[in-house]
Amino acid sequence: MFFRPGTLVWPQRQWLQAFFALTWVGAALWFAYFVVPNFVRFVPGLFGLLVVAFSLVWGCFAVYCPKCRLRLLFYAWSNEAVSGWLAWVLTCSKCARCGYDAQVSR
């Protein structure tokens, strides 16, 4: 898929996949409330918003550097470009804080 061995997220790829799945499901429910309000009521739309918020917070804490526990998603969202944070998370092999190299430690 999108994950390669030798990156920081490779050992935690299942958490990142769950993060993406939860975010998309929640966003779909929330978006459906605005597009088809007669079909999707307020409570499922609000539930979708809560799922998105939960998945964003949970994703920040679930994906981290194995050595210094730098939260990779939070770091990428705060330090990388808006269009480049995902590419950085998926391809980063060296920790920005401690210098841990995932390719060497394989």
Image (tube, rainbow, N blue to C red):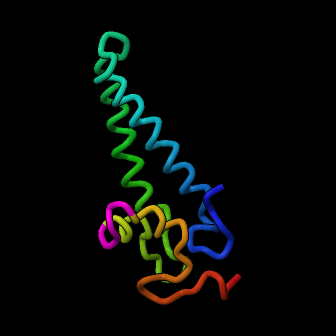
Instruction: Specify whether 37 is left or right of 92.
Output: left
Number of numbered discs: 0
Residue located farthest toward the right when viewing the structure as drawn? 106
Where is residue 32? Give x, y as percent: 37, 24
Magenta segment:
78-83
Where is residue 101? Give x, y as percent: 58, 86
Q: On screen, 98 above or below 15?
A: below
Q: Does residue 50 show up magenta in the picture?
A: no
Q: Main secondary structure of the magenta part?
A: loop
Rendered residue at 30%/68% (across/down): 78
Between 73 and 35, the one nearer to me in the picture: 35
Residue located farthest toward the front when viewing the structure as drawn? 83
Between 32 and 69, the one nearer to me in the picture: 32
Instruction: Specify whether 56 is left or right of 64.
Output: left
Q: On screen, 10 above or below 65?
A: above
Quadrant occupied by the C terminus: bottom right
Quadrant occupied by the N terminus: bottom right
Where is residue 26? Give x, y as percent: 41, 36
Where is residue 20? Give x, y as percent: 50, 48
Rendered residue at 42%/31% (across/down): 28
Q: On screen, 34 above or below 51?
A: above
Rendered residue at 61%/81% (across/down): 102
Q: Does residue 79 show up magenta in the picture?
A: yes
Instruction: Specify whether 25 is left or right of 36.
Output: right
Rendered residue at 48%/42% (across/down): 22
Instruction: Specify whether 16 is left or right of 38.
Output: right
Q: Quadrant of residue 15?
A: bottom right
Between 63 and 4, the one nearer to me in the picture: 4
